[in-house]
Amino acid sequence: MSRNTILPMQKLIVHVAILIFALLPLVSSTQKHTKKIIHECSDHKVLELSPKLSFQIILHGFLLWASMGFLMPIAILVMRMSNRQQCGRRLKLLFYTHASLQILSVILVITATTLSVINFENLFDNTHQRIGLALYVAIWLPIVAGIFRPDKRSKRRGAWFCFHWLIGVTVTLLGIVNIYTGLQAYHMKTMKSTSVWNWLFSAEVAIIAFIYLLQEKWHYKKQSGVILGNESVRPTDQQTSPTDEEKELSPMP
């Protein structure tokens, strides 16, 4: 599968993701199990948090936001900058930046998961915990794929590129969705408002999605400008020999 075929898929996934993220703050979820019950309010069982547990939950959420909601999307944007980069030094810099962001993201996920296992009740009876478990397994796949990256001249390079891109985008999107479900679970257990964090995170996701789409449009606009610029200085047919015309129409090195 060529990159030209993958590009429409990327745009479709991003547009669908933006629609989902716009609707997620309006969706409510229910929690079925809570052991530490202090009082009831409006038919919802409300969990009163100790200062220590409250700090641990906030730290858990921050670590997962930094990993899934920030570093991973930025790593994707950085790697997209290298798609048409010709300078070898810049390519190497972008590649190592992408890899470093991914590794740091995994380290943060491991830290957040360890914090959850030690301090929280992990009964996997809600959407947030189930998606989190799946993400903890899936987050290793892009790194493994990056380690076993085939050579550019290999016939497997196209299939590898498709898999690496697909699993990376899928993990990132699921991670963003799980941040919303985590905010909803926190609200349902404590009855504390999370609307401000929902809208702030939605604004961040919209900005990242805009930059993602702008990268492709910017390259197209730049390429079109170069083509139009070449056409504006092209000599007339009477002044151009067939040999020179063939040279002008040949692709630039």
Image (spheres, grey):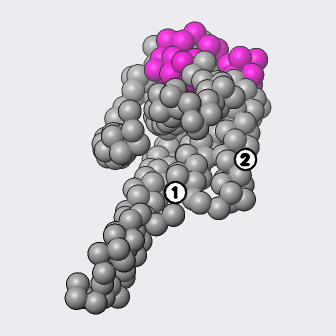
Within 10 Å of disc 2 (Cα), the crowding (few <14, some 14-19, many 20+) is some
Question: The N terminus lies in which quarter of the figure?
Answer: top left
Residue at screen point 64% across, 14% down: 121
Residue at screen point 51% across, 63% down: 253
The residue under label 1 is which amino acid type?
Arg
Discs 2/1, front: 1
Q: Which residues are magenta?
A: 114-135
**Which tag, 2 or 1, sits closer to the chain's start?**
1
Say which residue label 1 marks.
84
Residue at screen point 28% across, 90% down: 239
Residue at screen point 52% across, 26% down: 156
Say which residue label 2 marks.
96
Where residue 57 appears, as percent x and y from the top left, is 67, 32
Could you tell me what secondary structure mostly forms the magenta stretch? helix
Q: Quadrant of residue 114?
A: top right
Where residue 142 appears, as percent x and y from the top left, is 60, 29
The residue under label 2 is which amino acid type?
Tyr
SS at mark 2?
A: helix
